[in-house]
Amino acid sequence: MAQSSPSVRNYQRNDLQNLIGLYSRSLANSTHFVRNQGFVKYFMQYQGVNEGSVFVAETNGEIIGLAIVSITVEIGGLKQGKIIEFLARDSLSMRALIRVVINFCKGKDVDLIVVVPPASLEVDDIFKDWIKFETNVMMTKILSLPSLLQALLSSEKIITTCAGTSVVFQIGRELVEAKIGPKKVDISQIKGEPRRAKMFMSSSPQTFLKIIFGQLNPYVAYLTGRIRIHNVKNTRPMLKLLCMMQLTAPFYTGLADRL
């Protein structure tokens, strides 16, 4: 008999005991922190979590997956969605939960979403368009490039150092122009061919995310051809700007036993 597709809904308080049973079945053969009612309740009250941001997957009345999403506003106004607890019995429930979480985060105008996925042979396929930093440690996905650039470029250091600079970023197929002024940064999306700018850089989303999370040095990325810089003879200002565009990777206390 074919397995029925799981449905995803918001968590309800009477689901708690069933979640403890899911933990017991799913983690029985792996080393992990104890998951009890106190543990689960703690994450339900985590910063940025509310009743609408906790999801369960179920099939035939049985809970087979859990995703707890924390949405926070970081330095620079970056709105980040963090899946701080993620458990799925199988690939079907994992796919169903991720689809719902992505749509939920888009509805909340989240710029960047990050997750530590549970161990699964199908993780690479399910998260194939996400950037993976280390095996089973963290994956991330850009939901809004303009908002992400707005947050990255609005630091006092960048505005002071780069005021008067116009940069076009081509990240994958998306084109965004940033005009750094003495007090603020104006961001606009470009349709069609990019307009003339003092600097124009292009890279894949994976390379760009590795740079801003500090996983890849911009100079190394340029020398190895993973980023390209156009319209300038001196590439150092663009590379220095990329070095200043840094995010702090989130720390996943609740997922430490999966690292």
Image (cartoon, grey):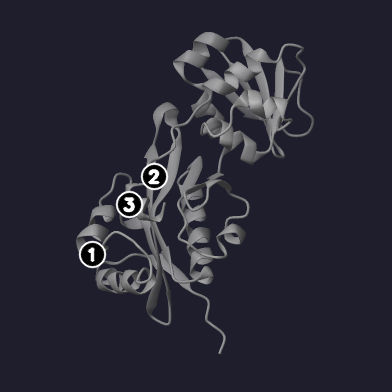
Kindly give the residue lying farthest to the left in the view shown: 38
Give the x, y percent position of residue 75: 40, 28
If you read the primary sequence from the N terminus, does the residue marked by circle 1 or circle 3 appear first?
1
Question: Under tag 1, what secondary structure?
Answer: loop
Q: Amino acid at mark 3?
A: Gly
Q: Answer left or right for 150 relative to 191.
A: left
Question: In the picture shown, does residue 77 fall above or below 254?
Answer: above
If you read the primary sequence from the N terminus, does the residue marked by circle 3 or circle 2 appear first?
2
Give the x, y percent position of residue 165: 63, 13
Q: Answer left or right for 51 relative to 125.
A: left
Disc 2: which residue: 71
Query: Is any part of residue 182 visible from this angle?
Result: no
Disc 3: which residue: 254
Question: In the picture shown, does residue 1 fall above or below 120?
Answer: below
Q: Which residue sits at x=62%, y=25%? A: 218
Q: Amino acid at mark 2?
A: Ile
Question: Under tag 2, what secondary structure?
Answer: strand
**In whole angstroms, how far apart are the C-alphas of marks 1 and 2?**
24 Å
If you read the primary sequence from the N terminus, does the residue marked by circle 1 or circle 2 appear first?
1
Q: Amino acid at mark 1?
A: Asn
**In whole angstroms, how far apart are the C-alphas of marks 1 and 3?**
13 Å
Mark 1 or 2, which is nearer the eye?
Answer: 1
Question: Under tag 3, what secondary structure?
Answer: helix
| Disc marking residue 36 | 1
Q: Which residue sits at x=59%, y=27%? A: 217
Question: In the picture shown, does residue 154 fall above or below 131?
Answer: above
